[in-house]
């Protein structure tokens, strides 16, 4: 297939692009490089430097600038949408930023897809759409009640996709997951996330001497070691999930909303101890107060992904998550 990956130079997007290339698909990456990196692009893929808020440029990308084409057949078989902003904390301070990029930008993508005759979209959603868990592990039937504006925008995008399916015949896959982590297990992707806020890259920066310590937000939760437990999914697993989801919706002509989770959960202390052991660095850590709204444990059920996609997390154990990340960060150590 010929696939347009929007946000394909970013952390998750570059891994998704690599997986599609490995499976023999043709790829065009559309990215404004606000968080993506040119070094994460591959020679086998085409690249368009563009923004999802530039509808004219996006339309040209999606249609192959069809004003000059005789054939009106779609240029692309599918779109992979990974261009939403994702910092939950920032979204509560700057909701306008997330409204414009995530919601307006997605409407532009959907309209460009309609104009380009593209009938398949895989959307990188989030388990943040669920909000405070009523039960664990979270499955796809859990109520959606986001607790931050980021999660709200992701849920709204899912609803937009549902309407465009009804009105325009677009098939979609919403992929819900928590914490993307790790780096390409084959070492082909080296570009570091810019301004990371997630736990593992923060730990890696401490290991590399780029920050003095890691803050642990609470150690008195009802968990085995008192620290928060989260569902971490390796980006190679996520890339495989995007591939499986696209194959599903194109093969079955049917949309899908599905969790991609490790199902096990790893505590903050477990992650830090694994990082110390693998990196050989002391990694200072300090207990600070809990953050408001942080639950003790968050894990997602992937039963549906197992059943309909044949997907399972292969690389999401603590050692693989940390080792693949440290292989990239250790070259930056001071």
Image (cartoon, grey):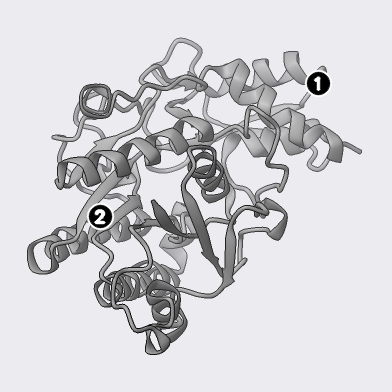
Above or below, 180 against 100 in this view is: above
Q: Residue at x 21, y 22 (%)?
A: 307
Above or below, 9 against 255 in this view is: below
**Residue indicated by mark 1:** 282
Classify residue 18 as left or right of residue 54.
Answer: right
Give the quadrant of the C terminus. Answer: top right
Q: Residues within 10 Å of mark 1 (few under 14, many from 20)?
A: some
Classify residue 274 as left or right of residue 251.
Answer: right
Q: Nearer the viewer, residue 106 or 231?
A: 106
Q: Nearer the viewer, residue 250 or 97?
A: 250
Q: Which mark is residue 52?
A: none
Image spot of residue 52 (x, y percent): 44, 73
Tell me which numbered mark, 2 or 1, is placed earlier along the sequence.
Answer: 2
**Residue indicated by mark 2:** 155
Image spot of residue 153 (x, y percent): 31, 61
Q: In this view, which residue lies farthest toward the front?
A: 70
Q: Quadrant of residue 217?
A: top right
Q: Quadrant of residue 224?
A: top left
Nearer the camera: disc 2 or disc 1: 2
Image spot of residue 7 (x, y percent): 50, 59
Q: Residue at x 28, y 65 (%)?
A: 118
Q: Residue at x 20, y 64 (%)?
A: 160
**Helix, strand or loop status at disc 2:** helix
């Amino acid at each position: 297939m010929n696939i347009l990956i929007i946000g394909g130079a970013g952390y998750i997007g570059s891994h998704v692009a690599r997986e599609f290339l490995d499976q023999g698909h043709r790829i065009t990456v559309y990215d404004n490089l606000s968080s993506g990196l040119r070094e994460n692009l591959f020679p086998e893929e085409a690249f368009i430097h563009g923004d999802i808020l530039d509808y004219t440029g996006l339309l040209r990308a999606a249609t192959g600038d069809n004003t000059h084409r005789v054939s009106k057949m779609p240029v692309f078989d599918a779109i992979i949408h990974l261009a939403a902003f994702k910092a939950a904390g920032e979204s509560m301070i700057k909701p306008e930023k997330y409204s414009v990029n995530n919601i307006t930008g997605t409407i532009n993508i959907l309209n460009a897809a309609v104009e380009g005759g593209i009938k398949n979209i895989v959307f990188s959603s989030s388990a943040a759409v669920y909000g405070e868990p009523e039960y664990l592990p979270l499955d796809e039937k859990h109520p959606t009640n986001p607790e931050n504006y980021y999660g709200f925008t992701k849920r709204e995008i899912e609803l937009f996709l549902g309407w465009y399916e009804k009105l325009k015949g677009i098939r979609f896959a919403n992929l819900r997951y928590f914490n993307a982590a790790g780096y390409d297990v084959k070492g082909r992707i080296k570009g570091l996330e810019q301004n990371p806020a997630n736990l593992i890259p923060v730990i890696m920066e401490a290991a590399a001497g780029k920050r003095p310590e890691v803050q642990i937000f609470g150690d008195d939760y009802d968990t085995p070691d008192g620290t928060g437990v989260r569902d971490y999914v390796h980006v190679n697993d996520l890339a495989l999930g995007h591939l499986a989801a696209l194959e599903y919706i194109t093969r079955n002509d049917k949309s899908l909303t599905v969790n991609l989770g490790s199902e096990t959960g790893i505590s903050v202390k477990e992650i830090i101890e694994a990082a110390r052991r693998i990196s050989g660095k002391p990694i200072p850590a300090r207990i600070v107060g809990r953050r408001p709204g942080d639950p003790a444990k968050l894990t997602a059920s992937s039963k549906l992904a197992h059943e309909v996609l044949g997907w399972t997390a292969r690389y999401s154990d603590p050692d693989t998550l940390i080792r693949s990340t440290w292989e990239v960060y250790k070259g930056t150590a001071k």
